[in-house]
Image (cartoon, rainbow, N blue to C red):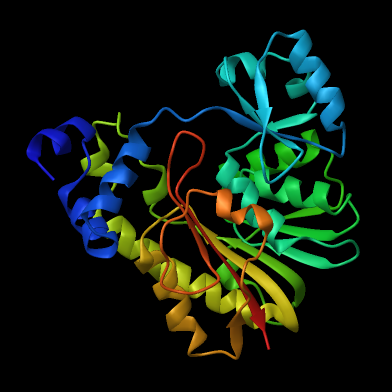
Amino acid sequence: MNEENQKKFEIPQFFIDMLEKQYGIEITKKIINGYNGRRLVSLRVNTLKSDSNTVRGKLDKAGIKYENTFFSNDAFIIKNVDEKVIKSLDIYEKGEIYLQSLSSMLPPIILNPQEGLDILDMAAAPGGKTTQMAALSQNKAHITACEINNIRVERLKYNVEKQGATCVYVMQKDARQIDDFFSFDQILLDSPCSGSGTINVNDYNLNKTFTKKLIDKSTASQIALLRKAIKILKPGKEMVYSTCSILSCENEEIIDKVIKEFNIEIVPIEYEWIEKLPLLPTKIDGTLCVCPNEYFEGFFIAKIRKK
């Protein structure tokens, strides 16, 4: 990749090298073009407080153009306004909708949270996926939302209350330190990561904030979190591991390392709409890696069953 393109996108050279090694030059170009596209605003209808038809009517009344997504009737892509306009609407103020990227809506859908089950969200803030799981289970699951950071815990509590997710218990704790005495029927581990799938090409500090050190730090944390998740997942039950990274060192390699230590297996992610996603190749069959574009952030998802 020539110096002109590198300068234009302000992407660190080490990262370009990693992408080209993993995906090849042509797919790397596609990824970088995806970063450069302006991502459309998307939102999720909070079915604990409203429904898709009601939200459609209020968007129409406000003159906001939108389209449904192919994977959920409750997910909308906004075509003609920015987040500021959406935040000025009463349906936002009342918690009837939640601004959320399309990619981040996928892990809860794939986990498929069920009523009456004990569910753990291991890195829950700011609460988009937590409240989505509450909505998907009609507020009838028992969801523990774990977050270590003080400020992020407060944001999580705010969103849980605003969205009316009464089945959620917020626990301020490092998820790696959860007592092995606990056990859960379903676990969502949307693991902290480098954010390589959500690169902001307009950030001229990217060379300072997105570093190899950040990736190395992330992978160490991811291994520890996944080990803990598997320990406290009930036998025969399933969990979802996801990141907003497209690097195999934060995704497939983490799973490969841990799968050798535990009696677990990959559950293939199979939905009719998957072929409509902008997918990148993965090194583990049955997992998903979404390519960044104007609709989606780069995102990896794997479903794991404890034997």
Question: Is residue 1 shown left or right of residue 305?
Answer: left
Question: Is residue 7 shown left or right of residue 297?
Answer: left
Q: Residue at x 62, y 43 (%)?
A: 126
Question: Is residue 289 shown left or right of residue 211?
Answer: right
Residue 10 point in image, percent of width and height: 21, 36
Q: Quadrant of the N terminus?
A: top left
Residue 299 point in image, percent of width and height: 49, 53
Residue 224 point in image, percent of width and height: 49, 74
The answer to whether residue 124 shows anywhere in this view is no
Can you name the residue that lies furthest to the left here? 3
Q: Is residue 91 above or below residue 32?
A: above
Question: Is residue 159 shown left or right of residue 118?
Answer: left
The answer to whether residue 176 shows anywhere in this view is yes
Q: Is residue 272 above or below residue 6?
A: below
Q: Quadrant of the C terminus?
A: bottom right
Q: Is residue 111 above or below residue 93?
A: below
Q: Residue at x 61, y 31 (%)?
A: 42
Depth order, front residue of 264/182: 264
